[in-house]
Image (tube, rainbow, N blue to C red):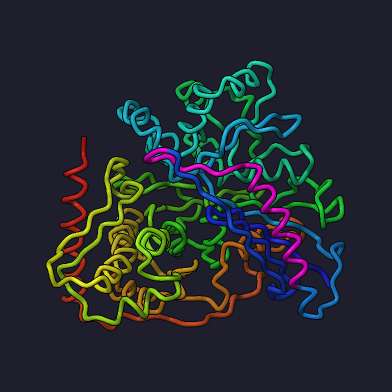
Amino acid sequence: MNYILSIDLGTTGVQASLFRLPDFTMLGNNKVPLKIVYPNPGWVEQSPQDIWKATQEAIKNCIATVALKNVEFKANEIITIGISNQRETCVAWHKNTGETHTPAIVWQDRRTAEFCEALAEKKFIHKKTGLLCDPYFSASKMNWILKNSPQCKAWEKQNKLCLGTIDSFVLWNLTAGKSFVTDHTNASRTLLYNIHSGIFDSELCELFQLEESCLPTIIPSSSLIGYTSKVPELPDGIPITGVLGDQQAALFGQQCFYAGEGKITFGTGAFLLMNTGPKIILSEKGLLTTVSFSDKDTRTFALEGSAFIAGSAIQFLRDQFGWIQSSGQVEQVALSEPRDPNVLFVPALSGLGTPYWNPLAKGVLFGLTRGTKKEQIIRAVLESIALQNVELLSIMSDESKHPLTKIGVDGGASKNNYLMQFQTDLSRVELIRPQNIESTSLGAAFCAWMGISGCRLDNLPKIPLEKKFLPIMPENKAKEILNHWLRATQCVNEFYTS
């Protein structure tokens, strides 16, 4: 038998999955949690070395889960490896030793908000990148590292500095330092990538005071990236032939290969992508333009809307208040009391994302009375995850001039039936949940298989579906709920606008 190892380098953990060919059945799976540190308000950090250790542990544990199923398997039957990763998080390391002197600055981090605000009037940033000048993206984080780490600045002067996203760091380690690369999907999230030319832009690098020599080589998502070397539990010489940013990998895993097809991933944040094919659409309403996939011949693009808080809102209730013991409880608890239409939550715990892009915004709870129960607050928090997506879906359809023809859902919170039904009631579009909601891992595996086999999109096996959700709430009620929440969100945005 032949297998593909898929490694998903997420924010809350690293997951390794083993897919059996030719049907892509998942035989092994393991996720190792990652610690997230909040040293100052708005700062979000992780240890780069912990990420690499978790990667090795996840691979080891994944292989062990296959053995528990009494499946005959040897690591040399892995014919290729695919990678997906949290995208804008950045790392600095020594190009020869892999040594790090600073934490990884996570995509949620807002420490560079003032720096980005000072550049906001430079309209060429959006025209070149398809992005907005926001702390979310990597360039300002890289700038901060060089300004605040004398060691990294010294490495830069010695031409020994690597600056990259998590895919670049882990690929460097998987190949024992031989491959310092990133793909087009990840490069397009840095604010340094010219989306039209497909390269790092010298004017953008100069703007953010970064040396191009410190950045990785950009390669197609589906291509030969390198070979494993000195990785515990894996033989040397396994080719790595696929790498995608996690949201693009989920789009690929949902098999949204053509224009008009989209997906929502309910992870730490909520991320909506709509495939626009070979067409680059620059949004005028706060959406992002991103590369969705690339091979040696083509690049395809997508419109993206980002909500920074989704599953992490449930973690917030669990960790800060102890109102639930696990995320799996939230549906039962939320539905145990009648819905109070006046209780609304705006989940701006890391600022407001698309279409407001307000890094200063804070989370706000509306409509409390002496009679409000915690269950009603929990329900409002749960519903806010879906509410923030509806406006984004509408903008996508308007700006692409292409109605959404398919929306797949995945990620941990997509298991919540109430949340999915509420989402389809508000958006008025059918949602499709696959049997395997690990779409990100599957997308990385598809990408790697295409990279090693030359397989075409149409020849990939169709993913089995678990459930479809159709609108059942009266449309006038759905509009009332949405408009009520949008007024609350606009109030928050205005209050926290500097």
Is 400 situated left or right of 163 in this image? left
Q: Position of residue 196 (x, y in %)?
A: 49, 38
Q: Which residues are magenta?
A: 40-65
Residue 294 is at least partly visible in this image? yes
Q: Main secondary structure of the magenta part?
A: helix
Q: Position of residue 303 (x, y in %)?
A: 41, 52
Give the answer, above or below, for where 192 lies relative to 378.
Answer: above
Residue depicted at 29% across the width and 82% down the height: 336
Choose top left, top right, bottom left or bottom right for residue 115: top left
Give the answer, above or below, for where 351 lies relative to 395.
Answer: above
Q: How many marks?
A: 0
Q: Magenta segment: does it hold 55?
A: yes
Residue 262 is at least partly visible in this image? no
Residue depicted at 64% across the width and 49% down the height: 221
Choose top left, top right, bottom left or bottom right for residue 428: bottom left
Give the answer, above or below, for where 47 lies relative to 485.
Answer: above
> What is the quadrant of the N terminus in the image?
bottom right
> What is the quadrant of the C terminus in the image?
top left
Residue depicted at 47% across the width and 25% down the height: 208
Q: Position of residue 108 (x, y in %)?
A: 43, 45
Residue depicted at 66% across the width and 58% down the height: 447
Is 478 situated left or right of 318 in this image? left
Q: Magenta segment: does it hold 166?
A: no
Q: Position of residue 410 (x, y in %)?
A: 49, 68
Residue sitting nearer the eye, 300 or 140: 140
